[in-house]
Image (cartoon, coloured by chain):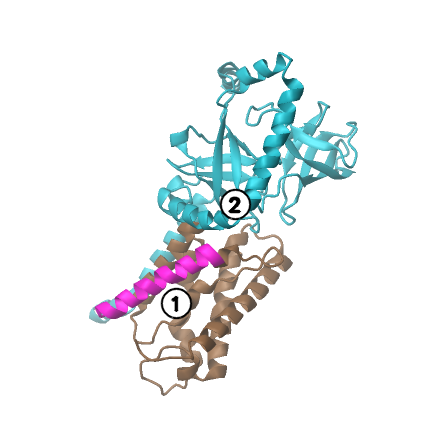
């Protein structure tokens, strides 16, 4: 990995962590709905990245957020799991014959496949996150409500971000 | 053999994945058993500083409100002082309570989670140790759980593992205040004997038994009373008098139990 893209990733990691810890963690609709926007970084990992690099970035992203949220291991575990499946999930939404370097976004994947990709990624992450957080599991209805509504909120945030950034999918 | 090695190298990320997951889960289940180490919580000075800076910005915008509140509290205290001024009581109280309170600012707070914590900007350096009571002008906030050098994490009333002994104001029968999740303005008072005359609207205060809190710190008002399942005790819904979603400054009761009482308890448990 060249130095420039390393620095870019480092800054997006710090930026996303600050955004999550200082602003988004304080959002609390109806008492339990919180957007977990920080996984945006994992969503945008390009197809040329080494899988071990993806895992490490995701782990440290989650760990930093844990450090500030007083939830050691929670975000690290769910982000690492998401990172493990990210390359596979991207492949579900692009034609099999594509072999170019691809940054997942609406411009490179098309609007609908990208939205599907987002939904699947967010649902996977939020499910793991809320299941781990609710252990010992008891109230399943509450758990499902938390996952569904938090996932919807995160999804909306990401669509807005994608729209504002103009769906730019250029390789950085 | 060679192809096996190749396979392992090509799939080394799987081992990395397993390693990172195990590490995360050890952190998650190792630390969350109420024995959190200061360095992994917001009591560590790095995240404490960041959170303090951010809550500083928040508080700047609420200074006017905070000022009004302080003036109001001052007035109230002054009133009380006048009422008491000619009795010996003041001197007694002063002797009892000298330097037993540390004021701290809340730098991080959650009320939405199932288990909430809050961080204050005073730590072991300021004489805080785990087990000290935290309250503000409205009432009980929680108990210090972990102390870092400059910051501490407080286990607030709104946490499943919090339990604070409380009584009806003016009476002696007591119970334990707990919180079962959900509404952040309502907690439950359990184990109160069923013959105690508790009615809706009564004021609930701390007992002062454990010296975690001074006696008679307000906790809340009774919102509902019912018999518990076993029939011997009451289950009381309490509207908390302190709004935990909106905390600025809090007081830490730094007076710990009398050494004599402590040593007696130790003898019993030995």
Disc number lying in front (2 or 1): 2
Tag 1: Cα neighbours inside 10 Å, few (<14), some, or many (≥20)?
Answer: some
Judge by depth and name the residue closer to the eye, B149 or B233: B149
Where residue B63 is drawn, which disc sits there?
A: 2
**Residue at 65% in and 49% down:** B183
Residue A21 is a magenta residue: yes
**Residue at 27% in and 65% down:** A7
Chain A drawing hue: brown
- The segment highlighted magenta reads A1-23
- Is residue B135 among the parts visible in the rendering? yes
Give the residue at mark 1.
A41
Q: In this view, does B82 lie to the left or right of A86?
A: right
Q: Where is residue B219 in the image (x, y as percent from the top left)?
A: 65, 34
Where residue B215 is drawn, which disc sits there?
A: none
Q: Position of residue A122 (x, y in %)?
A: 49, 68
Q: In this view, does A61 lie to the left or right of B8?
A: right
Q: Where is residue A130 in the image (x, y as percent from the top left)?
A: 53, 58
Judge by depth and name the residue closer to the eye, A20 or B23: A20
Cα distance, mark 2 to mark 1?
A: 37 Å
Which residue lies most toward the top here? B88
């Amino acid at each position: 990995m060249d130095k420039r893209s390393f620095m870019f990733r480092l800054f997006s990691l710090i930026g996303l962590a600050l955004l999550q810890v200082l602003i988004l963690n304080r959002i609390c609709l109806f008492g339990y709905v919180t957007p977990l926007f920080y996984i945006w970084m994992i969503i945008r990992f390009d197809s040329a990245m080494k899988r071990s690099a993806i895992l490490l970035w995701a782990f440290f992203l989650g760990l930093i957020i844990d450090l500030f949220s007083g939830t050691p291991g929670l975000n690290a575990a769910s982000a690492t799991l998401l990172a493990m499946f990210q390359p596979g999930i991207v492949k579900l939404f692009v034609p099999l014959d594509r072999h170019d370097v691809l940054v997942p976004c609406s411009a490179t994947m098309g609007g609908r496949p990208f939205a599907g990709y987002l939904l699947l990624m967010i649902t996977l992450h939020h499910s793991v996150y809320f299941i781990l957080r609710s252990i010992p599991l008891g109230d399943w209805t509450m758990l499902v409500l938390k996952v569904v509504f938090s996932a919807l909120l995160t999804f909306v945030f990401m669509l807005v971000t994608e729209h504002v950034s103009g769906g730019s999918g250029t390789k950085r | 053999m060679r192809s096996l090695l190749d396979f392992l190298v090509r799939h080394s990320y799987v081992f990395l994945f397993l390693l990172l997951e195990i590490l995360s889960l050890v952190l998650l289940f190792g630390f969350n058993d109420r024995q959190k180490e200061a360095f992994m919580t917001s009591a560590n000075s790095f995240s404490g500083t960041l959170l303090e800076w951010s809550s500083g910005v928040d508080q700047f915008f609420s200074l006017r409100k905070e000022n009004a509140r302080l003036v109001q509290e001052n007035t109230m205290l002054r009133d009380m002082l006048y009422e008491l001024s000619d009795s010996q009581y003041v001197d007694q109280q002063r002797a009892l309570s000298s330097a037993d309170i540390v004021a701290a600012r809340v730098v991080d707070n959650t009320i939405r989670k199932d288990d909430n914590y809050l961080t204050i900007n005073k730590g072991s350096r300021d004489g805080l140790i785990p087990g000290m009571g935290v309250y503000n002008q409205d009432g009980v906030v929680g108990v210090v759980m972990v102390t870092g050098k400059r910051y501490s994490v407080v286990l607030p009333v709104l946490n499943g593992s919090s339990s604070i002994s409380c009584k009806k104001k003016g009476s002696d029968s007591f119970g334990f205040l707990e919180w079962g999740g959900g509404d952040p303005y309502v907690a439950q008072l359990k184990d109160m004997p069923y013959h105690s005359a508790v009615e809706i609207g009564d004021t609930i205060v701390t007992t002062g038994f454990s010296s975690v809190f001074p006696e008679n710190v307000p906790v809340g008002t009774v919102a509902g009373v019912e018999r518990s399942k076993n029939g011997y005790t009451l289950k009381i819904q309490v509207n908390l008098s302190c709004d935990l979603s909106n905390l600025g400054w809090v007081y830490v009761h730094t007076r710990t139990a009398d050494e004599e009482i402590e040593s007696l308890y130790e003898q019993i448990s030995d």
